[in-house]
């Protein structure tokens, strides 16, 4: 299976865009894009959304390998770790498992997400178009939304406009697990 970076590079090259062109379209630095493509570095969600928008594809396109027919069923035993986001570019902080992989006509991005203790070490806020719905499966989750901070427990949920700067992380040294559905308008 090809990496996220190789898929981004493939879409960029299909459109005959240079790394400089993509950097201009996204506002991201050239060396950052090159690190994603060549060094297998996984960025946070915000840069991935910018890259998907600039390339005219859904965020899930970077995760899809095949087309399925409706309905799409994702078995727990077959769930694969698809994307690891690094808060500092080195240590994994968030592990994403796509629950929509293969449904190419989807309008939402459903994920099962493991928030590792490292996720709490980075307090940077992200912002992107769309909406997010999160429900806590296990552990404690800290949500920073604008100037507000909330702690969610298993069974708690939050639904918000993701254009408002926000951050999602586990609390303390225990991993937390969430289900999240992200919607990006066309």
Image (cartoon, rainbow, N blue to C red):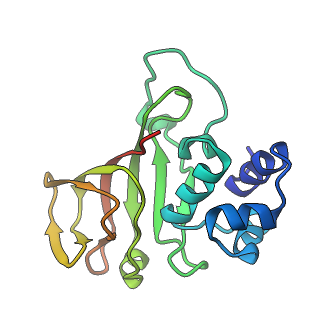
Along the viewing direction, whichever of 81 and 29 lies nearer the viewer: 29
Is residue 1 visible in the rendered structure shown here?
Answer: yes
Question: How many circles with numbers are drawn on the protein?
Answer: 0
Q: In which quadrant of the rendered image does the N terminus lie? A: top right
Residue 171 horizontal/vertical position (percent): 25, 76
Left/right placement of residue 118 relative to residue 37 reads: left
Up/down of 108 relative to 45, above or below? above
Q: Residue at x 43, y 33 (%)?
A: 107
Question: Quadrant of residue 136 in the image?
Answer: bottom left
Q: Residue at x 53, y 15 (%)?
A: 69
Up/down of 67 relative to 151, above or below? above
Along the viewing direction, whichever of 181 and 50 lies nearer the viewer: 50
Is residue 36 visible in the rendered structure shown here?
Answer: no
Residue 140 horizontal/vertical position (percent): 21, 68
Q: Residue at x 78, y 62 (%)?
A: 21
Along the viewing direction, whichever of 41 and 59 lies nearer the viewer: 59
Residue 62 horizontal/vertical position (percent): 63, 46
Left/right placement of residue 106 relative to residue 12 reads: left
Question: Quadrant of residue 119 in the image?
Answer: bottom left
Residue 48 horizontal/vertical position (percent): 57, 58
Left/right placement of residue 69 relative to residue 180 reads: right
Left/right placement of residue 6 relative to residue 93 reads: right
């Amino acid at each position: 299976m090809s990496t996220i970076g190789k898929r981004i590079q493939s879409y960029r090259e299909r459109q005959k865009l240079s790394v400089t062109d993509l950097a201009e379209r996204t506002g991201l630095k050239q060396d950052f894009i090159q690190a994603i493509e060549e060094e297998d570095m996984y960025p946070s969600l915000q840069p991935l959304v910018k890259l998907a928008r600039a390339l005219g594809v859904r965020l899930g396109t970077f995760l899809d390998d095949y087309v399925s027919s409706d309905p799409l069923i994702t078995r727990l035993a077959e769930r694969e770790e698809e994307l690891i986001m690094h808060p500092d570019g080195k240590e994994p902080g968030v592990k994403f498992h796509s629950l929509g992989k293969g449904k190419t006509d989807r309008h939402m991005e459903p994920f099962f997400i493991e928030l590792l203790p490292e996720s709490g070490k980075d307090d940077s806020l992200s912002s992107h178009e769309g909406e997010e719905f999160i429900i806590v499966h296990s552990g404690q989750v800290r949500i920073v939304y604008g100037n507000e901070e909330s702690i969610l427990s298993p069974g708690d949920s939050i639904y918000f406009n993701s254009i408002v700067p926000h951050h999602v992380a586990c609390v303390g040294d225990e991993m937390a697990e969430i289900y999240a559905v992200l919607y990006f308008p066309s």
